[in-house]
């Protein structure tokens, strides 16, 4: 089994532009080595009869059919508008005119 030393953790952190303290380097070294130990355990699991899958639980399309329906009445929609002008929502200007 391969292990990760402090020098490797420091080098990877440097490449990722992460500035870790000595304590954080030590914690990361321990954590990464635990991950490698777990990965080693997974190598021993028999997966001969397990089919490859993209995700652990089946995905279900939750979208409804695209059905034309009547819109809300304009008056009811405008009740939600903090500021309304002639049936339109008024919002703060974000583009300056020249």
Image (cartoon, rainbow, N blue to C red):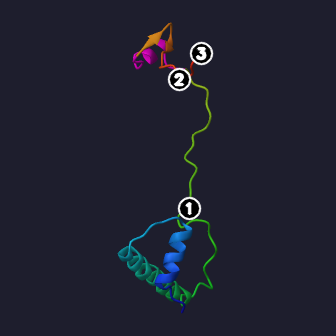
Which residue does the image show at 55% across and 20% down from the upper left? 70
Question: Picture coordinates of residue 97 (x, y %)?
Answer: 59, 15
Q: Are marks 1 and 3 in contact (CB under 8 Å)?
A: no
Question: Dot 3: within a 10 Å radius of its alpha carbon, few (fewer than 14), some, or many (20 or more) residues?
Answer: few
Q: Quadrant of the C terminus?
A: top right
State the residue in front, 69 or 96. 96
Nearer the observer: mark 1 or 3; the answer is 3
* Residue that mark 2 sits on: 94
Q: Residues within 10 Å of mark 1 (few under 14, many from 20)?
A: few
Q: Between marks 1 and 3, how big is the CA–CA gap?
A: 52 Å
Quick one: 7 or 72, which is closer to the camera?
7
> Looking at the image, is 25 positioned above or below residue 17?
below
Q: Quadrant of residue 53?
A: bottom right
Q: How many marks?
A: 3
> Quick one: 65 or 8, which is closer to the camera?
8
Please name the residue that numbered disc 3 is placed on: 97
Secondary element at image label 1:
loop
Residues marked 1 and 2 touching at CB (< 8 Å)? no
């Amino acid at each position: 089994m391969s292990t990760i030393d402090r020098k490797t953790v420091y080098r990877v952190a440097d490449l990722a532009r992460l500035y870790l303290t000595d304590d954080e380097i030590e914690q990361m070294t321990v954590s990464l080595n635990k991950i490698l130990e777990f990965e080693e355990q997974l190598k021993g699991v028999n997966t001969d009869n397990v089919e490859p899958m993209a995700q652990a639980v089946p995905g279900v399309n939750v979208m409804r059919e695209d059905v034309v329906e009547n819109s809300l009445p304009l008056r009811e929609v405008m009740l939600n508008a903090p500021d309304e002008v002639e049936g339109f929502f008024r919002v703060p200007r974000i583009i300056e005119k020249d």
